[in-house]
Image (cartoon, grey):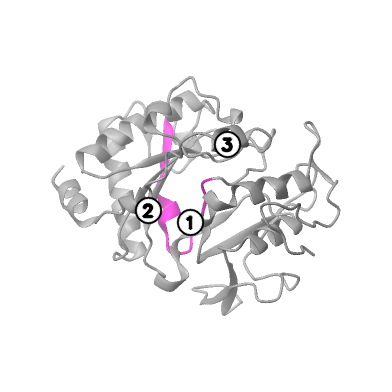
Amino acid sequence: MVAKASKNSAPEISNPQKVFWPEQGYTKLDLALYYQQVFPLLRPYVLDRFLTLERCPDGMAGQCFYQKEKPSSMPAGTPTKRLKNASGTRKSTNYVLGGALETQLALVNLGCIPIHVMGSRAKTFPKPDWVCFDLDPTSGKFADAARAASQIKELLDHLGLASFPKTSGSRGLHIFIPIRVGPLAKDVLSFAETLVKRAAALHPKDLSVDRAIKDRGNRVYLDPFRNGSVQTVVTPYSVRRRAGAPVSTPLAWTEVKESIDPAQFNIKNFGQRMAKKDPWKDFFKSRQSLAPAISKLKKL
């Protein structure tokens, strides 16, 4: 069990020297220390959000499984909220809510490496405060995702929407748009689907909305479906269960270049990144109405 922790003390983690990344020798404690260090930056993106747990008790070496129901071993007083399920045998799920360092370290203790959140906060569900797009290069080349991101940004700029890019922590990019709470998730999803279809029509050689991999060729897949009411996306600053322990890293648009290597951002060197200006510092201050952009998009 995770005991009390602060930014100035090492967290108490069970089996802390268990190796999660054998190639680099990174341990479970290394993961906990990373999240403890970065939590002041991470907290705004997990605060009062429903968490879906991806538990990887053996790190890179073993299997992972997803869990939505709050584990019984979580600390007493862990914030939770119950949601009715639209389908399945379980009528409802008691989700863990993010926002506390103790919660985050307890999740690490259970083998949770990445952080998956919904777009809505618990108090406003199902009304999200961001739109997100997942750019997945079928080629596996980050350079393709970077080119696609610039094409999406051009369209978003035309619609008058401020947007913020980040590495996915894998091979692609995520683009987030902070919005004012108001539209339901289904309407945000509809907007996202319409936008990616328009982008693919404008750049048919580069972009695809085909869900079947075989139909994409080498085009970048534009995924709008992270915007569903209970769908999730990895947060900024989330570690990924990938070789080298990469971090899903907020970027300035000037940093989105074909030459960038997303693996350069990882749990061992992220302190250097934190010493620089936060490119997403004004993310939540940039919340904007989606209505004007929806109207403009209909006319394109």
Left or right: residue 166 versus residue 158 is right
- Residue furthest to the left in view is 299
CA–CA distance in space, label 3 to label 2: 25 Å
Q: How many marks?
A: 3
Cα distance, mark 1 to mark 2?
Answer: 9 Å
Q: Quadrant of residue 256?
A: top left
Q: Mark 1 or mark 3: name the one nearer the start of the chain.
A: 1
Helix, strand or loop for disc 3: loop
Q: Amino acid at mark 3?
A: Ser
Q: Quadrant of residue 227?
A: bottom left
Q: Which residues are magenta?
A: 219-236
The mark closer to the camera, 3 or 2, is 2
Residue 136 visible in this rendered orientation of the protein = yes
Q: Amino acid at mark 2?
A: Phe
- Answer whether residue 262 is magenta in the image: no
Residue at the disc numbered 2: 284
> Which quadrant of the structure image shows residue 77?
bottom right
| Mark 1, secondary structure of its residue | helix
Which label number is shown at residue 170? 3
Residue 229 within the segment the image draws in magenta: yes
Q: Earlier in the sequence, mark 3 or mark 2?
A: 3
